[in-house]
Amino acid sequence: GAGVSQSPSNKVTEKGKDVELRCDPISGHTALYWYRQSLGQGLEFLIYFQGNSAPDKSGLPSDRFSAERTGGSVSTLTIQRTQQEDSAVYLCASSMTIETQYFGPGTRLLVL
Amino acid sequence: AQKVTQAQTEISVVEKEDVTLDCVYETRDTTYYLFWYKQPPSGELVFLIRRNSFDEQNEISGRYSWNFQKSTSSFNFTITASQVVDSAVYFCALSEANYGQNFVFGPGTRLSVLP
């Protein structure tokens, strides 16, 4: 596709359940980023993938959060044992190294 | 370390007024990139401009203009003759070339343009 796509667009889950969020980056982009944006807040960096290098996980808020990127393309962000404070919009972006990031539409996660 | 500050949390202007959004950054790198993104109410972040650290020329694109000043570590964004459609949250961001490739975003400025 022409842009970054994310699925699902919305996710409602119960506290304690696991969720998986998917990101399809722009074809050919080597870098992929996950961010979290809480209501009315700025962007919080979560994790960064660059090619086949080990990911930069410095932004993950707890060990309940993990992400993988298969084949250097699609990425999945997994949140285990979700908590209400995990409710946010999760944004994915891709880029060619330090060039411009292009963002997906986000996944709105609501934990009840 | 990288840091981006947008001191203005919210700004309200009346349509057709000019408005400037401030961005101040901190970096240890000599090669870096600065960005502005727009996030309209629909939520999707839209890229507006990228500027590298070696290019201090100001840029104008229609009603938008950007003033990059390395001496004050600022990269301010001006909207001339604002319109209601300019209402959005605007984020300034920084990427360093030599100290990892993490993008750091400022907290954003919410601009409301009133008719």
Image (cartoon, helix red, strand yellow):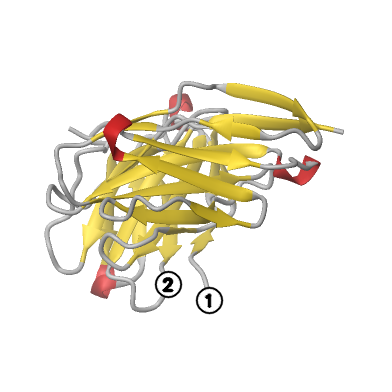
Quarter-wise, where is residue B111 in the image? top right
Amino acid on which disc 1 is placed: Ala
Disc 1 from disc 2: Cα separation? 7 Å
Which mark, residue A26?
2
Identify the secondary structure beneath mark 1. loop
Residue located 28% across and 48% down the image: B95
Tag 1 residue? A2
- Mark 1 surroundings: few (<14), some (14-19) or many (≥20) residues within 10 A: few
- Mark 2 surroundings: few (<14), some (14-19) or many (≥20) residues within 10 A: many
Quadrant where the C terminus of chain A lies?
A: top right
Amino acid on which disc 2 is placed: Ile
Is A15 left, or right, of A105 in this rendering? left
Cβ–Cβ under 8 Å for marks 1 and 2: yes
As rendered, which of B62 and A30 lies closer to the eye?
B62
Measured as percent of width and height from the top left, residue A80 is found at 34, 40
Q: Can residue B65 be seen in this view?
A: yes
Identify the secondary structure beneath mark 2. loop
Is A83 left, or right, of B70 in this rendering? right
Q: In this view, does B66 lie above or below A81?
A: below
Is B8 left, or right, of A74 in this rendering? right
Quarter-wise, where is residue B28 in the image? top left
Q: Are marks 1 and 2 on the same chain?
A: yes
Q: Is residue A18 visible?
A: no
Measured as percent of width and height from the top left, residue A24 is found at 43, 68
Marked residue nearer the N-terminal end (1 or 2): 1
Measured as percent of width and height from the top left, residue A30 is found at 27, 70
For the image shown, how many numbered marks are present on the structure?
Answer: 2
Measured as percent of width and height from the top left, residue A40 is found at 57, 28
Residue located 51% across and 70% down the image: A3
